[in-house]
Amino acid sequence: MNHMENPQDELDVLIIGAGVSGIGAAYHLQKEHPGKSYAILESRADLGGTWDLFRYPGIRSDSDLYTFGYQFKPWTDEKAIADGPAIKAYINETAVENGIDRKIRYGHKVKRAEWSTKEARWTLTVELADNGESFEMRAKWIFAATGYYRYDQGYMPHFDGLADFAGQVIHPQHWPEDLDFADKKVVIIGSGATAVTLLPELAKEAEHVTMLQRSPTYILPVPEKDRLGLALRRWIGDQRAYRLIRRKNILRQKFVYQFSQRFPKAARAFIRRVNRKELEGSGCDVDVHFNPTYDPWDQRLCAVPNGDLYKSIRNGSATVVTDRIETFNQAGIRLESGQQLDADIVITATGLNVQLFGGIEVEIDGEAFDAPESVAYKGMMLSDVPNLVFAVGYTNSSWTLKIDLVCEYFCRLLGHMDQVGADIAVARITDPRMKRIPLLDFPAGYVLRALDSLPKQGTEEPWYLAQNYAKDSRFLREGNVADEYMEFRRSERKSEVEEEIPV
């Protein structure tokens, strides 16, 4: 664990989190503002964020790495849909190549952040993982690259009779490295990306795997490799090929999402046809187990590389059951239909617990920050919260596409403040009558459970989250940072310091 030599020194920017967002933020910051000081505080013992935390078999991205990867660093692995270790290695390589790794302080958990308008500074209380001691750091800006969920706790619903179960119960967020599932009966509870990823991987060694879902999810096969991308790399080199394939895949994502939203019946019919073809002769009833009640892209689609999930069902090593749990018992799970699922291991792929800013307590001039009363500004700042940027990616496209835009805009914002001599930037709502709606218009269970604790969004720009890369790209790259909603100020501290400087 490496500690800062002078932990109370003031910094220009403190980046919280050394995952894909935090490393990206550091790259942009030191490229555009090489004179500004920064550090990355990471509560865990290594970088990678999600890709370090989740260790379950088969962990992978559900977006292609040509769009999930950074705009500035080509993805050169053969596989476009990559596994967790490969993604973590890519993030680590980015950090090392750019000297960002030397700025990371591992085992540093931010517990509290207090803003002083008079000082134009954040004071952060940081706890050290190795001894539990706390100290303070000060910074002009916070870049919260903390993701959107609790790292220490996944979502676990109540199950009657769980204590009676004689087998093992595992949550994917806390996967034991020594878990032996060979020749075991495994039941996976859930139907999201984690369950869909686990099923084919566990089915390779388990006696049998059952994916128990309360309701189906839209699932589509995707090629693990982008053959056009691989060919272009041979012809025109990594950099140019990466740019072209990235652009192609961004347009494809946009088309699929917009087509699904505008023509849901046609999209649903297409997905059903694909599933029927993939599962032909398997005995799996597509109308029951692959027939969601919602429209495509009302929730995120699950991608299965090379159709691996379908193969496991076709060869009989895995089964999908759509039903509700009545109770656990010693042997496994009894369903409301009366069916008994015997199990040696039950995996609860039941979702995440959403958490803002990694659970950090935030105070503004002595007043506790009330997240539900704030409104997101350009999807990266919050109303009445000065000098704080947060990074949350897209729900309908690759996460990192939005992160790159946020980082670029943040650097433009810092540049403007330097030009005008301001040290405080805060977004203000000018129309108190503006309608407020949930921040995430996304009916996934983990989102619905957290809506009451999250900030809101408005119904008009810049308070509305477009979830549209092309629109956001124009808005954040070309839009005016000094709009009518952004208030720039010079603090008392800055004014006093400048008065002391001889002209």
Image: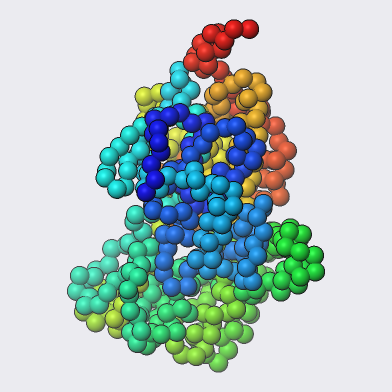
Left or right: 6 as drawn, with respect to 289: left
Q: Is residue 75 visible?
A: yes
Extreme residue in the left direction: 164
Residue at horizontal 60 percent and vertical 78 percent from the top: 306
* Residue 302 sits in quarter: bottom right
* Residue 163 sits in quarter: bottom left
Left or right: 478 as drawn, with respect to 31: right
Q: Is residue 226 above or below residue 258?
A: below
Left or right: 123 as drawn, with respect to 492: left
Residue at horizontal 32 percent and vertical 41 percent from the top: 127
Instruction: Please name the colour scheme applied to the rendered image.
Output: rainbow
* Residue 3 sits in quarter: top left
Residue at horizontal 45 percent and vertical 20 percent from the top: 119
Q: Is residue 186 above or below residue 130?
A: below
- Counting the numbered discs, the total is 0
Q: Looking at this view, is 101 or 52 the one in front?
A: 101
Q: Looking at this view, is 385 or 228 the one in front?
A: 228
Extreme residue in the right direction: 235
Residue at horizontal 53 percent and vertical 85 percent from the top: 311
Q: Looking at this view, is 430 or 349 the one in front?
A: 349
Q: Position of residue 289 (x, y in %)?
A: 49, 78
Q: Is residue 113 visible?
A: no
Q: Position of residue 307 (x, y in %)?
A: 58, 79
Q: Is residue 498 above or below residue 485?
A: above
Extreme residue in the bottom direction: 281
Q: Position of residue 332 (x, y in %)?
A: 27, 79
Q: Position of residue 48 (x, y in %)?
A: 48, 56
Extreme residue in the front direction: 5
Tell me the quarter of the image containing the C terminus: top right
